[in-house]
Image (cartoon, helix red, strand yellow):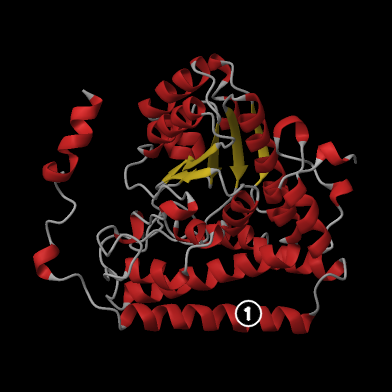
Amino acid sequence: MNENSVTPVAARMAGDLGVDINHLNGSGPGGRVTKADVISAEAGPLTWLKQMIAVRRFEEAAGQGYNRAHIGGFLHLGIGEEACIVGSCAAMQAEDYLFCTYRSHGHALARGTDPKLVMAELYGRQAGTSAGRGGSMHIFDAERRFMGGYGIVGGNIPLAAGLALAVKRRGEEAAVLCQFGDGATNTGNFSETLNMASLWNLPIVFMISNNGFGMGTRLDRHASHTDLSQRGEPYDIEGSQVDGMDVEKVKEAVGAALFTARSQSRPVILEAITYRFRGHSAADPEQYRSKDEVEEWKKRDPIKLYAASLMERDLLSQQQLEGIELSAQDQVDQAVEFALHSPEPEAHTLQDNVYVDTANTAGALETIR
């Protein structure tokens, strides 16, 4: 690899971390290796396993908090979908943007948001990511370009395309990753946005986390054509599928899709076949599927399978695994304690951020006019 194929910062960082840049696929212009590529390579298999376990323990604790009435509103857990969550976020560059659904606690954690702040948001506390206003369905972290969870099915799709348009107009070297479930592919928002994304050649990846159910309706009962990766064909958008229970395959597929979106400024569809081990929400009686079906899918638990794979490759020992489990549980316990003892928003702030502060925006509006 010649010196023009890698940025100076990336070269120095690779040397410091012991990363072999000759084996990296550059995501920069012309395939140039960047700082983000080195960071991604350094954060390897053990990191992904740690993140998946941390997400699982966080979700379990959130479920317990909901059952104890510490968490109000709705709660949608991502238990079983950790490979999709961690793999997709591991493939992103720091400059990329992420949009999710109401099942997005794990995405925030994988993107780097402090678990204490995410748990505080679930508990409706002032220290939460949205100051306790958003709750479980509206986690947000602009600093890490995590543009939020959304309570409306498919509601995030046109917003993500709008940001992709802004990215393109500003000339940013970034892409937008928009994640949603199989049920959202039946909304008008989805079809309309695919049309505009293709027409305007937007740098966006539409990632369908297909867990087999649109709420409680099985895929073959809500979709006339069950290969959702091909939904973009009428709009000339390429699509593909990936095993959503394999974190490495998800990372590779999402990374390739983001590279295409970023380098060629065009939309891509990726369908990840996954499964949730819990109900649609914490209050779901799950009468639409059998316990045998769930148990069969649990044989493909992404965490257990990946841990076993790492052990087979001599990348993980049983002692290391036990240490990772203990560390994740400790982290979650601290997050719960932080949330429990954090103050609630004060009553006089109830209407904050509900209406536009015209006194502070008048000048900006005049400039636009």
**What residue appears at the point 37 percent right and 80 percent down from the top-left corner?**
338
- Give the quadrant of residue 13: bottom right
Q: Position of residue 269 (x, y in %)?
A: 58, 31
Is residue 263 toward the left or the right of residue 10 in the image? left
Q: What element carries label 1?
A: helix
- Can the viewer see residue 246? no
Residue position marked by numbered label 1 in the rendering:
325
Residue 47 rendering spot, x and y as whole percentages: 69, 66
**Callout 1 amino acid:** Glu
Q: In which quarter of the image is the N terminus?
A: top right
Residue 310, can we see it? yes
Eyeballing the image, is 262 above or below 295?
above
Q: Is residue 275 above or below residue 124?
A: above
Q: Which residue is drawn at 73% across and 51% down?
A: 9
Which residue is rendered at x = 66% and y = 60% of the image? 302
In the rendered image, the vertical position of residue 23 relative to residue 159, given as above or below: below
Residue at the farthest left position: 348
Residue 66 placement, left or right of 369: right
The residue sitting at 47% across, 49% down in the picture is 145
Residue 170 x %, y %: 48, 29
Residue 121 against residue 140 in the figure, above or below: below
Q: Percent from the top left, x then y, of residue 229? A: 60, 30
User: How many labels, in total?
Assistant: 1
Q: Nearer the viewer, residue 201 or 276?
A: 201
Image quadrant holding the C terminus, namely top left
Front-lying residue, 47 or 227? 47
Residue closer to the observer: 12 or 116: 12
Q: Is residue 71 left or right of 236 when viewed as pictured?
A: left
Question: Dot 1 surroundings within 10 Å: few (below 14), some, or many (20 or more)?
Answer: some
